[in-house]
Image (spheres, grey):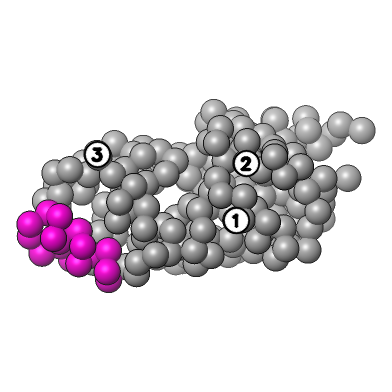
Amino acid sequence: MIRNIVFDLGGVVFRIDKNQAIRRFNEAGFAEAAQYLDAFAQVGIFGQLEGGVITAEQFRHELSLLAGKEMTMEDCARGWQGYFVELPQRNLDKLLELRRRGYRVSLLSNTNPFMMQWVRSDAFDGHGHGIEHYFDALYLSYEMRVMKPDRRIFEMMLEGEHAVPDETVFIDDSAHNVAAAAALGIHTLQPQDCLAWHEMLEKFLSQP
């Protein structure tokens, strides 16, 4: 029996566009953003930030050195938050519905302080709620200091939830992340769109 449903953030809860983030960093004066940003995993100082190796201020300082100009915290936030495109109300409603049905609903995301600054704010859903309103627990790479698809982040999530793999389903749009979770015995779903998981999940949950 499934008791725990664990969601990725970008690409699952909301729609993302890495090219928009790249454009924003370019506009701020960092022309090489495309070399560092990816839809699933970042490299260099971008990956170090999401992996909790460096702080937001250290990221800003290092980005300034790379760009050859002083970058502000606002430049960094606008760039990172450029990943966000759309937050379907249907997704938020579904998260609350799953919790009402008795499932433990958690978030497991490779993310960073600049993105979570907005995601945790009351501006997140347009109704005065941050993301904590929709989830029982958040497992964030920069706080845990480990990133998907490292098996340790899944083990830490299971421990935090007091959950066993066979009672857990993980929903992520990355094949690497899904494979890592499946290797631990966690059930997985890999939607190709942030609205595609609704039907996939209900079909899975209805299986005997």
Q: Choose mark 3 or mark 1, whichever is in front.
A: 1
Question: Disc 3 marks which residue?
Answer: 34
As drawn, is 150 to the left or to the right of 16? right
Image disc number at residue 153: 1
The C terminus sits in image quarter: top right
Q: Check if residue 97 falls in the magenta segment.
A: no
Label whose residue precedes the other's in the sequence (2 or 3): 3
Residue 159: image quadrant is bottom right
Residue lying furthest right in this view? Answer: 208
Q: Of 145 and 100, which appears nearest the observer?
A: 145
Q: Residue at x 53, y 31 (%)?
A: 193
Earlier in the chain: of badge 2 and badge 1, it is 1
Who's the residue at 70% across and 30% down the image? 200
Neighbour class for label 3 at 10 Å: few (<14), some, many (≥20)? Answer: some
Residue 70 belongs to magenta span: yes
Tag 3: amino acid: Ala
Numbered badge on residue 180: 2
The amino acid type found where label 1 is placed reads Ile
Q: Spot the residue most to the left.
A: 68
**At which x and y percent is residue 100?**
77, 55
Q: Are marks 2 and 1 in contact (CB under 8 Å)?
A: no
Q: Is residue 140 above or below residue 36?
A: below
